[in-house]
């Protein structure tokens, strides 16, 4: 704040003390300030004096007022880092051999003593845990016998009805009979791959791609064809079209909304073009919509499934990123291959758990899910923005970071001389878990100078310290 008059007014004195606290880091960006009444009592001044102090701080851009919430320290704009460029993977299909590397990395994501910025799951602080447990306890009393029985495919009718209702928000009017309940989205994708491909077939995927998808392709003896991906708009459709003209592809697997790890979101027109392109060629589209509900904008992106007129799109999703990772409740709407997927589901796991899908169905039916999502999206949006600021503040010049409009992940490109596998090891020694870039490609030399960072944990001094530690380690590897 600029120099005050020789005898500052009372509200200016209050404002100056708050500004000093902000500049010293005692009050951080996003922190809530005391209520007007609380500050009035603390400073022993009138309510009107406090209001004047807050108005002054807001006028100089230090704080902001949120309706029905209070006054908060405003985030100071930092120069935005450039985004990673469009990926340029090899144009040939390749066998996938990523599981051993993923296994080594994944062990660190289970260590409670580490600062977890490697795993892509939300903190339990952001989830309606108690509410879900209440629903589960009530169901145990009311329908305890049901929990002891097989829930054979297609699975929980109550949840399938709720999914059909929610499909209207996705732009698709699906029926309960269109859905099959699965053990998470991972099983849904696995079943879709089994339904469309045989050993040795090629699956076209985004590059980089989620390592769980790569592991599924590897376990089935399939080959992966990496397609360039823009950090803003997702899979490059011209590159996909050229690849389809060169070789036979058994299916295309995409994450159109807030992909893992890049966080890209495919524009609506591109989704429509993608569906039409594959429908014309008879190539199934496996759509992973795991992050679709985690949009930061007002409107949810339309699914590719909403443009499907022939049943060629196989829509997969789950509640693992929004409600309860440990419940492992997912679903698939496999279109024209529904009967085959249902038979595969039965042969694969016979049935899904009974009470867990029922608890989620009741939560959805009572309206709790939409209220929870609004709060979750706001928190994740703030955390993604704060993590991106942390990268800009602590990482060296030449770092690039994606700008996701949803989800909970940051894809970070480090200076070209930095080996993220070495960085991963040194970060573990320093008590921090990150996800190194090579686990997101079937080719172990790809994305060596990239890392994925999870924004699912609330921002705390411990998280900020971990960001500073990783930034310092990056500098030592340049």
Image (tube, rainbow, N blue to C red):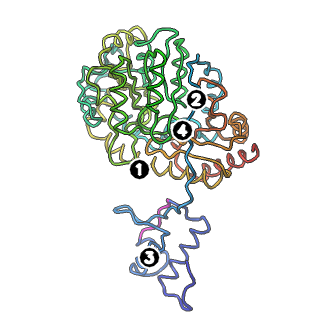
Image quarter in which the C terminus is found: top right
Q: Which residue is mark 1?
A: 378
Separation of marks 4 and 2 at Cα, in angstroms: 10 Å
Q: Secondary structure at mark 3?
A: helix
Q: Which label was assigned to residue 89? A: 2
Q: Nearer the N terminus, badge 1 or badge 4?
A: 4
Pointer 3 residue = 40
How crowded pointer 2 is (Cα within 10 Å; few <14, some 14-19, many 20+) is rated as some
* CA–CA distance in space, label 1 to label 4: 28 Å
Of badges 1 and 3, nearer the viewer stands 1
Mark 3 or 4: the one toward you: 4
Q: Residues within 10 Å of mark 3 (few under 14, many from 20)?
A: some
Q: CA distance from mark 2 to mark 3?
A: 60 Å
Disc count in the image? 4
Read off the residue under disc 4.
86
Name the residue: 33% across, 41% down: 300
Choose the circle earlier in sequence order: 3 or 4.
3
Residue 289 screen position, x and y as percent: 39, 31
Crowd around label 1: few <14 · some 14–19 · many ≥20 (10 Å): some
Q: Of marks 2 and 3, which one's residue comes earlier in the chain?
A: 3
The correct choice, above or below, for 148 with respect to 169 in the image is above
The residue range painted magenta reads 30-35
* Disc 1/disc 3 C-alpha distance (Å): 29 Å
Q: Mark 4 and 2 residues: CB-CB less than 8 Å, in contact?
A: no
């Amino acid at each position: 704040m600029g120099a005050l008059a020789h005898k500052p007014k009372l509200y200016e004195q209050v404002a100056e003390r708050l500004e000093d606290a902000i500049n010293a880091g005692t009050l951080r960006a996003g922190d809530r300030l005391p209520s007007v009444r609380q500050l009035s009592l603390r400073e022993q001044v009138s309510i009107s004096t406090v209001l004047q102090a807050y108005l002054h701080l807001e006028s100089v851009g230090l704080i902001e007022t949120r309706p029905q919430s209070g006054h908060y320290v405003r985030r100071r704009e930092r120069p935005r880092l450039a985004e990673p460029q469009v990926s340029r993977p090899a144009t040939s299909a390749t066998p996938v051999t990523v599981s051993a590397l993923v296994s080594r990395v994944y062990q660190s994501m289970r260590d409670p003593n580490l600062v977890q910025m490697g795993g892509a799951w939300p903190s339990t602080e952001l989830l309606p845990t108690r509410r879900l447990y209440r629903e589960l306890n009530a169901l145990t009393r009311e329908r305890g016998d049901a929990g002891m029985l097989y829930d054979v495919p297609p699975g929980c009718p109550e949840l399938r009805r709720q999914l059909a209702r929610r499909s209207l928000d996705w732009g698709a009017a699906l029926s309960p009979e269109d859905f099959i309940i699965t053990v998470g989205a991972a099983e849904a994708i696995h079943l879709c791959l089994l339904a469309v491909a045989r050993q040795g077939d090629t699956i076209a995927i985004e590059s980089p791609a989620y390592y769980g998808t790569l592991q599924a392709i590897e376990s089935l003896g399939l080959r992966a064809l990496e397609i360039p991906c823009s950090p803003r708009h997702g899979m490059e459709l011209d590159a996909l079209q050229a690849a389809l003209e060169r070789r036979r592809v058994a299916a295309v697997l995409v994450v159109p909304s807030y992909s893992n790890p890049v966080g890209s979101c495919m524009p609506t027109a591109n989704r429509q073009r993608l569906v039409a392109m594959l429908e014309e060629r008879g190539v199934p589209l496996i759509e992973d919509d795991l992050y679709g509900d985690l949009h930061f904008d007002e409107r949810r992106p339309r699914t590719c499934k909403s443009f499907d007129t022939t049943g060629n799109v196989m829509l997969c999703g789950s509640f693992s990123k929004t409600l309860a990772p440990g419940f492992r409740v997912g679903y698939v709407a496999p279109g024209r291959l529904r009967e085959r997927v249902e038979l595969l589901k039965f042969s694969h796991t016979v049935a899904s758990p009974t009470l867990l899908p029922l608890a989620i169905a009741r939560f959805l039916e009572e309206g709790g899910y939409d209220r929870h999502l609004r709060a979750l999206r706001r928190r994740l949006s703030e955390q993604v923005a704060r993590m991106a600021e942390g990268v800009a503040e602590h990482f060296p010049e030449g770092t690039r970071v994606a700008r996701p409009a949803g989800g909970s992940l940051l894809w970070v490109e480090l200076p070209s001389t930095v080996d993220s596998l070495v960085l991963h090891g040194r970060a573990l020694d320093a008590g921090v878990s990150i996800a190194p870039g090579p686990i997101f490609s079937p080719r172990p030399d790809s994305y060596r100078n990239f890392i994925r960072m999870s924004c699912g944990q609330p921002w705390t001094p411990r998280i900020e310290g971990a960001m500073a530690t990783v930034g310092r380690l990056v500098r030592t590897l340049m």
